């Protein structure tokens, strides 16, 4: 897909990878950014004039519905939905600071909101000549690590969801793509990990994947991880478990 003159909705465009994507797309496209913090949305709007902002907490079903309604009102035809927003709670279930209430919130933002927004925006996507849904995934959706169990599980769920949705839409104008990210230097990974991609590099790679219409785009070290997971799964699990 050529990324000019498109109507685009991106969740979580106020930080990290999403913000770099918005910076790259906003001049040549109509971009609506859905995120939770009104303050960060206002800052983004000042930096990227012309974008449309929508304040919504994607953990709340009513907010997901109102975000979809705002997008439908703005765009009769939607070319690209980028499901990027996610949260990652890092404690293990054995840690004293593990809070059971985070489970529902993490599943809601990382998985339920993606499915619901997709369903609510599908009619607008089907009105485009060519359209795509891009789900931002993670190497942790292929091989889990020890902590962040719920995050890993939601990313694995996104992978299976994307593959099934792809089958449902195979005779339509809507493509279902995934970008599998390695460790990227964003607030989500602040204070942990080494050898990270910059958010700018991750965003550029992801956009290349859309332009080249790659269904499951493995970025950076994920190419090697996917091969290892297939041919030497024990080694892959050993590498990732403490990531
Ligand atoms: N960073 C990595 O190493 C890495 C690796 C693999 C995959 N990924 C994936 O890449 C994507 C982007 O991650 P990132 O590292 O760029 O994250 P980030 O910097 O933490 O940004 C997350 C974005 O999601 C939004 N968001 C979070 N909770 C929300 C909610 N309840 N409602 C609405 N918006 C919400 C945030 O907006 P507010 O600030 O307004 O809440 C923010 O714009 C995610 O899908 C993540 O799983 C990241």
Image (cartoon, rainbow, N blue to C red):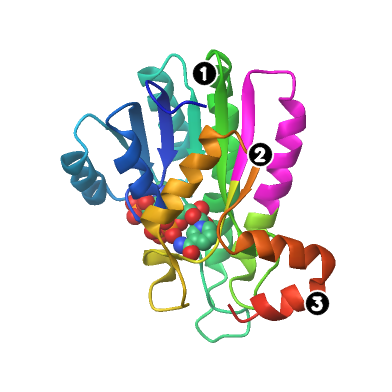
In space, the residues marked 1 and 2 are separated at their CA atoms by 21 Å
Location of residue 103 by image quarter: bottom right
The mark found on residue 234 in the picture is 3
Element under disc 3: helix
Find disc 2 in the rendering and name its residue: 215
Residue holding disc 1 = 124
Q: CA distance from mark 1 to mark 3?
A: 43 Å
Q: Is 95 left or right of 228, judged from the image as shown?
A: left
Q: Earlier in the sequence, mark 3 or mark 2?
A: 2
Query: What residue do we see at 54% from left, 78% from top?
Result: 91
Q: Is residue 164 magenta?
A: yes
Residue at 62% across / 61% down in the picture? Answer: 222
Residue 86 in sight: no
The quarter of the rendered structure image containing the C terminus is bottom right
Per the rendering, the mark at residue 11 is none
Q: Secondary structure at mark 1?
A: helix
Q: Is residue 75 above or below residue 176?
A: above
Q: Nearer the viewer, mark 1 or mark 3?
A: 3
Which residues fall within the magenta stretch? 157-178
Q: Is residue 201 magenta?
A: no
Instruction: Determine whether the residue tagged by mark 2 lies in a helix, strand or loop.
Output: loop
Q: Earlier in the sequence, mark 1 or mark 2?
A: 1
Q: Nearer the viewer, residue 36 or 86?
A: 86
Residue drawn where x is 64% and y is 70% of the image? 149
């Amino acid at each position: 897909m050529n990324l000019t003159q498109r109507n685009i909705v991106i969740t979580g465009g106020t930080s990290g990878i999403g913000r770099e994507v918005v910076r790259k797309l906003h001049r040549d496209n109509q971009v609506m950014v859905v995120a939770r913090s009104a303050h960060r949305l206002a800052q983004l709007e000042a930096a990227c004039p012309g974008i449309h902002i929508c304040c919504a907490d994607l953990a709340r079903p009513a907010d997901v519905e109102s975000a979809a309604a705002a997008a439908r009102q703005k765009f009769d035809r939607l070319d690209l939905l980028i499901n990027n927003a996610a949260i990652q709670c890092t404690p293990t279930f054995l840690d004293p600071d593990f809070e059971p209430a985070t489970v529902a919130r993490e599943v809601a933002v990382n998985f339920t909101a993606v499915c619901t927004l997709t369903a609510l925006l599908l009619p607008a996507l089907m009105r485009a000549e060519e359209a795509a849904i891009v789900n931002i995934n993670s190497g942790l959706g292929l091989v889990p690590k020890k902590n962040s169990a719920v995050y890993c599980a939601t990313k694995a769920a996104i992978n299976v969801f994307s593959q099934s949705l792809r089958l449902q839409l195979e005779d339509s104008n809507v493509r279902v793509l995934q970008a599998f990210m390695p460790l990227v230097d964003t607030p989500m990974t602040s204070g942990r990990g080494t050898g990270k991609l910059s958010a700018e590099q991750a965003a550029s790679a992801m956009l290349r994947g859309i332009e080249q219409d790659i269904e499951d785009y493995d970025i950076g070290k994920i190419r090697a991880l996917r091969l290892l997971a297939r041919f030497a799964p024990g080694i892959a699990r050993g590498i990732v478990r403490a990531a």
